[in-house]
Image (spheres, rainbow, N blue to C red):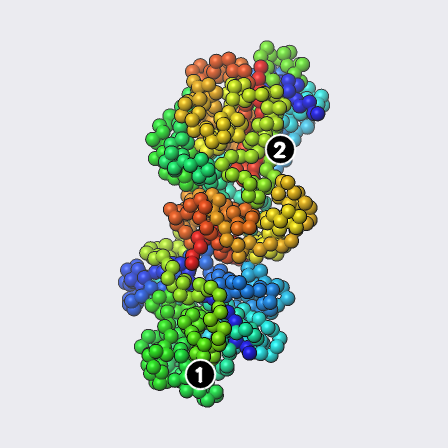
Amino acid sequence: MVGIKSYGAYIPRYRMNHNTIFGAVGFLGTFPTPGEKSVANHDEDTLSMAVAAGIDCINGLKREEIDGLYLATTSQPYMLRQNSAIVAVALDLQSNMRTADFIGSSKAGTSALVSAFDAVKGGTSSNILVCASDCRLSKPGGPQEHLYGDGAAALLLADDGVIATFEGSYSVSYDFPDRWKTSAEEFEHAWEDRFIRDEGYAKMIPEAISGLLKKYNLNIKDFAKIIFPGIYVREHAAILKRLGAEPGQIQDTLLDKVGDTGAASPLMMLVASLEDAKPGDKILVASFGNGSDALFFHVTENIKKVGDRRGVKKHLALKKELASYEKYLAFRNLAPMDMGMRGEMSLRTPMSALFRERKAILSLCGSKCKKCGTPQYPFQRVCVNPDCGAVDQMEDYRFSDKKGVVFTYTGDNLAASIDPPAIYGFVDFEGGGRFWFDFTDCDLDSVKVGMPVEMAFRRRYVDEPTGVYGYAWKATPIRA
Amino acid sequence: MAEGIKDKVAIIGMGCTKFGELWNKGAEDLMVDAFQECIEDAGIEKKDINAAWFGVHFEEQSVGKGATSLALALKLPFIPVTRVENFCATATEAFRGACYAVASGAYDIALALGVEKLKDTGYGGLPGGPGLMGTKNALIMPKLTAPGSFAMMATRYFAVYGLSPEEGKRMLAKVSSKSHYNGSRNPKAHLRREVTEEQVVNAPIIAWPLGLFDCCGVSDGSAAAIVTRADMAKKFRPDPVYVKALQIALSSGEELMYTKWDGAHVETGYRAGVLAYNEAGVKNPRKEISMAEVHDCFSITEAVTMEDLQFSPRGKVKEDIEAGRFNLDGEQPIQPDGGLKCFGHPIGASGLRMLYEMYKQLQGKAQMPERQLKNPKLGLTHNMGGFPAMNIVSVAIVGL
């Protein structure tokens, strides 16, 4: 049976209260509803979050069985250079696989899911990881600013051992011009909100859901949970009422906790519903964006056997308030900040070296000596153990999934950083191996020698003249 | 067994510019200044020099690649000139090249000159750049700066020896305060103001736990030496200074990538010290080394180096610091000229600047009489380049 084999999610650590936004740019006339939104750290973006959700999803599973990776987003860092391929290499997946970017609409997440199910069903792939992630830039003071949140979800689709079977889908597509952005633009445009709500949201979601119900001869009451983005709070409730759903069937939209996460939104809600699902539950998911895809799932007994996942729940619980709106502007590069002359030196990226060293840099792989068993990072030809020194006796060894402890650290105020001090240090990995890394998602006061850490894939720098986003692995306190 | 070069080479002249933020001097000016003092001190003429070794680290900040900048600045008459670079040991490497050249008999008289013009970057601290790992730097290195990398050694030292940050910072404050005392008595130093321990402890943090006064200055400067075969030395002056040992050691990767290193010492420092003591025939460095100029780029570096060079037992440097052992009037004065702390660290010049102080002290010619030590026998210089986990250390021992 084709279905979902595993799930994962990611929500950045920072949350910003809508009142913080209102306090800073409320004079422009936006009136946010109560709540908070998740904010990506300065070193996070769509790809780093997709990788984090992917890691959560494949934790404990065999990576070598994954033969496809689809990335869904409306905020892909690269227009040219496949974003999904970067996620795949960060996850250290095999190269004998399909990768594809699903972009350009907030229904991209469900579109990727439907396509992936088709491929698994058709037998061309057996394990496809679908990552949906969005980290959308909005103009300061605009209505999207408090509406949009950053987050990601990942679902592993397979043809056996699934926790929820994929039962069917129904799609509608319209060139609905609610939001748009040309390839040359930094910010999106949006037509009048009432038009989007009444002509799009309130019509297209019910059309897809009703179509699905009719196609598969279902009743709305069959579903344990009904999921679709909640960007219009009152209309969200009204649609459910019109469909005949009871309050107990409504899946929380995360709107006042995370915000609208674009292409990731319906998938994050699906993950949240799976976290609480029981065998036999039917779940209906619909997206919104240039139409809608509606899908439905049937939860199996395997749901009880899902390994430890951080999912939506644990990520929601572990947060830190970002109380400074100015810092948010700095993180998103929305206001020019003075980083000093030292900060103006740009790192150039030797692309051929990046490709040659991709296993070390993007997959965080080193080597393990077959003679003495010493793990070492990065890959060495001559064993670093002074009592061994074997030459060319190495096998690949992945560090990204190893935990470690802080050997030593500092908080550096001289290093150019948008969020000083720059915290970095040495990590001693469980099972062996030591290297130095930047630290992230931590405060200097909380870092201690011996503190447990894990590794996180992050955007480390922007090489503007060359147009390159530089990614690397950083150490971070274990979040859950 | 290799014989080493003990007593085979003598220094017959040295020169050293004032170090500082010399906005009105370029690298060429500094080279000429150091060289003129050096050959006047040696009592020779430019034409007597057979070959030269030239040290500069950040060539992109000042003179460009190769050794032509030295040959051109001094108008050296078509003699062999070699440029060397080995991080902060660059000047000592230039000196080593010159010493080996005369020790081998290839030349009679050789020049070693180091220079660095750091203050043309537009910001504080050392110039940024590809640094340690070249092409891979952008791809794989964390946002490491020099103070940050040494701060990690302080964090580690405190953790290994059970010092609270307050205790650790107090210990380090004594190191910096002592060097400022010496530097304030040296007209060639950059920073010439005494600072109290309280000032050091309360200074703004540069990289936790190191504050402003735990860090050495950043300055411009140049220093030079003329060396000759030992058997010729007395022809030039009655008080030549002899080279007793000249060694370097480099990291093997073990510190950075293997998990045995404790992070609270510099392995190369210990190794280079052992090599140098063997070459010089020093059995008990704590007793036999009269004085030293060590690489105090940061206060923690000096503290750890006292242990690496076996001046203090492992983990016990705090007791020696507190007892005043390394003060100008202590049993084993360290940084009698003020050290990198007060001279700053024009990288290509520092090693020769250190030798300049040892040379003058051995000759009884320290510039201000109150800095002159009583009858020093052996002086040691020590440079450490790179970061504690990945570096080069040089150790030179000189004596009468």
Q: Which residue is drawn at 53% across and 34% down?
A: B266
Q: What is the secondary structure assignment of the residue under circle 2?
A: strand
Can residue B31 be seen here? no
Q: Mark 2 lies on which chain?
A: B
Q: Position of residue A150 (x, y in %)?
A: 42, 64
Crowdedness of circle 2 by 10 Å Cα count: few (<14), some, many (20+)? many
Residue A208's tag is: 1
Residue B335's tag is: none
Q: Distance between the residues labelled 2 and 1?
A: 73 Å
Q: Position of residue B183 (x, y in %)?
A: 43, 24
Nearer to us in this view, B390 or B84: B390
Residue B84's tag is: 2
Q: Which residue is drawn at 48% across and 68% down?
A: A306
Q: Residue at x 41, y 41 (%)?
A: B208
Quadrant occupied by the N terminus of chain B: top right
Nearer to us in this view, A286 or B15: A286
Q: Position of residue B260 (x, y in %)?
A: 55, 41
